[in-house]
């Protein structure tokens, strides 16, 4: 058996989660509880090695609106505009936007994952979306 330190990152976190599964107070919290564990494991792994990937490299390989070459070009342009505008947000605003729209989580789940009040999540989302809208409008781009 290999020592824990040489295992893949995150495995130990999920082993701990499995061991403490019985301590989960309510089953409806399972999704956000596991998501928080995964997020913390990912953050720990990134802290151990400096990330060298840009947001643009994390783009999905397939965009749902790429039925034609023209649609693919427009979708790529929209992605580049969005990535450029996301850079005007704070890290916490980008994280909340990602959890809400990329991961498809509800505000209550985001609050549990980030361990902040649900009202704070709502405020962060509102401010982030308002700043994004302004960033697009300042450049004369459609939202």
Image (cartoon, helix red, strand yellow):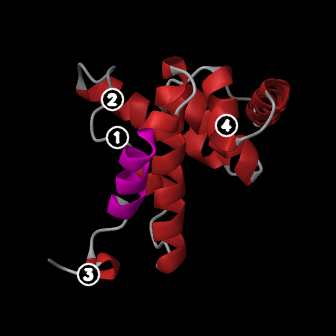
Query: Which mark is on residue 63?
Result: 2
| Residue 142 visible in rendering | no
- The x and y percentages for residue 46 are 49, 69
Q: Is residue 14 above or below residue 23?
A: below
User: Which quadrant, please, contains the C terminus?
Assistant: top right
**Tag 2–tag 4 contact (CB < 8 Å):** no
Callout 3: helix, strand or loop? loop
Camera-side residue: 55 or 134?
55
Q: Nearer the viewer, mark 2 or mark 4?
A: 4
Q: Residue at x 70, y 32 (%)?
A: 111
- Residue at the disc numbered 3: 3
- Residue at the disc numbered 1: 60
Left/right placement of residue 98 relative to residue 30 reads right
* Magenta highlight: main SS: helix
Q: Callout 1: few (<14), some (14-19), or many (20+) C-alpha neighbours within 10 Å? A: few
**Tag 3–tag 1 contact (CB < 8 Å):** no
Q: Residue at x 55, y 27 (%)?
A: 101
> Whole-Å distance between the Cαs marked 2 and 4?
22 Å
Callout 4: helix, strand or loop? helix
Q: Is residue 49 above or below residue 74?
A: below
Q: Nearer the viewer, mark 3 or mark 1?
A: 3
Closer to the N terminus: mark 3 or mark 1?
3
> Whole-Å distance between the Cαs marked 2 and 1?
7 Å
> Which residue is situated farthest in the front direction here?
22
**Tag 4–tag 3 contact (CB < 8 Å):** no
Instruction: Tell me the magenta residue range.
Output: 11-21
């Amino acid at each position: 058996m290999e020592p824990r330190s040489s295992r893949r990152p995150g495995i130990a976190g999920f082993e701990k989660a499995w061991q403490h599964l019985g301590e989960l107070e309510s089953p409806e919290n399972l999704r956000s509880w596991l998501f928080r564990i995964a997020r913390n494991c990912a953050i720990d792994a990134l802290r151990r090695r400096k990330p060298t990937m840009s947001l643009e490299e994390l783009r999905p390989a397939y965009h749902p609106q790429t039925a034609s070459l023209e649609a693919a070009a427009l979708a790529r342009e929209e992605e580049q505009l969005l990535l450029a505008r996301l850079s005007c947000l704070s890290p916490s605003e980008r994280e909340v936007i990602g959890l809400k729209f990329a991961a498809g989580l509800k505000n209550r789940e985001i609050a549990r994952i980030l361990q902040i009040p649900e009202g704070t999540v709502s405020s962060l989302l509102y401010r982030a979306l308002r700043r994004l809208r302004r960033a697009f409008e300042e450049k004369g781009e459609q939202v």
